[in-house]
Image (cartoon, rainbow, N blue to C red):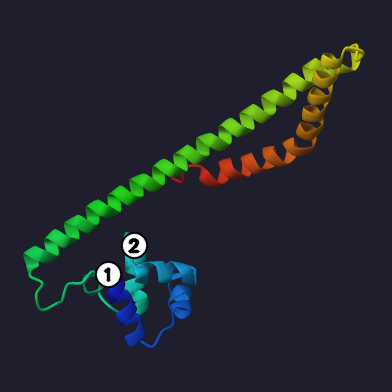
Amino acid sequence: MLNENIRTIRKSKGLSQEELAIKVNVVRQTISKWEQGLSVPDADMLISLSEALETPVNILLGETIAKASTDDMKAISEKLEIINLQLAQNKATRRKILHWLFISLCTITLLTFVILAILGSPYLDWDYSDPEWAVVGVIFHAFEWFFIRLSPFVLISSVIGICLTRKKS
């Protein structure tokens, strides 16, 4: 019902999917998915859609104004509030998980760098006449070579990720 209402109201306003997407700050494919019923907008996006389409949220959700009574509006309002709280909690949980993932990545990168610095390329002193040690030495050297070149990017990306996902007061 929501998907049909979005499409019908958008067309009645003479808007293309691209124009509506620009108004609500999403990509056109998102509008298409909403209209096909493949996904639904969250509570914040419903409000943005209602503002962009100049239509009340309850009309978007499929309820007509004439049928809505005060009790029904209160029940819908409470349900939307609960949904909004659940969405906010999910968003906060995802942000927290990402934040700790970036902290872990940063820590692992720093610890690996310290371990490699302490070891000081021990494979250089190995006897490479033994084929097994030669293979292990080449693998260790390749790991060290890639790590030293990639670790600055990983570290900088992790620090940026930590800053972007920190809890905002």
- Left or right of residue 134: residue 27: left
Indicate the secondary structure of the residue bearing disc 1: helix
Question: Image quadrant of residue 73?
Answer: bottom left
Eyeballing the image, is 157 above or below 9?
above
Which amino acid lies under the numbered mark 1 shown in the image of this protein?
Leu
Whether label 2 touches label 1, CB < 8 Å: yes
Image coordinates of residue 161 in percent, x first then y, are 58, 44
Which amino acid lies under the numbered mark 2 shown in the image of this protein?
Val
Dot 2: within a 10 Å radius of its alpha carbon, few (fewer than 14), some, or many (20 or more) residues?
A: some
Please tell me which residue is depicted at 23% across the width and 58% down the height of the picture: 80
Indicate the secondary structure of the residue bearing disc 2: loop
Residue tagged 2: 40
Please tell me which residue is depicted at 79% across the width and 16% down the height of the picture: 119
Dot 1: within a 10 Å radius of its alpha carbon, few (fewer than 14), some, or many (20 or more) residues?
A: some
Image coordinates of residue 11 in percent, x first then y, are 35, 85
**Residue 2 — which label?**
1
Eyeballing the image, is 130 above or below 17?
above
Please tell me which residue is depicted at 13% across the width and 59% down the height of the picture: 75
The residues bearing labels 2 and 1 have C-alpha atoms spaced at a distance of 8 Å
Eyeballing the image, is 45 above or below 133?
below
Image quadrant for the C terminus?
Answer: top left
Relative depth, front residue between 123 and 53: 123
Eyeballing the image, is 2 above or below 83?
below
- Left or right of residue 1: residue 68: left
Relative depth, front residue between 155 and 148: 148
**Residue 84 — which label?**
none
Image quadrant for the N terminus?
Answer: bottom left
Please tell me which residue is depicted at 62% across the width and 28% down the height of the picture: 107
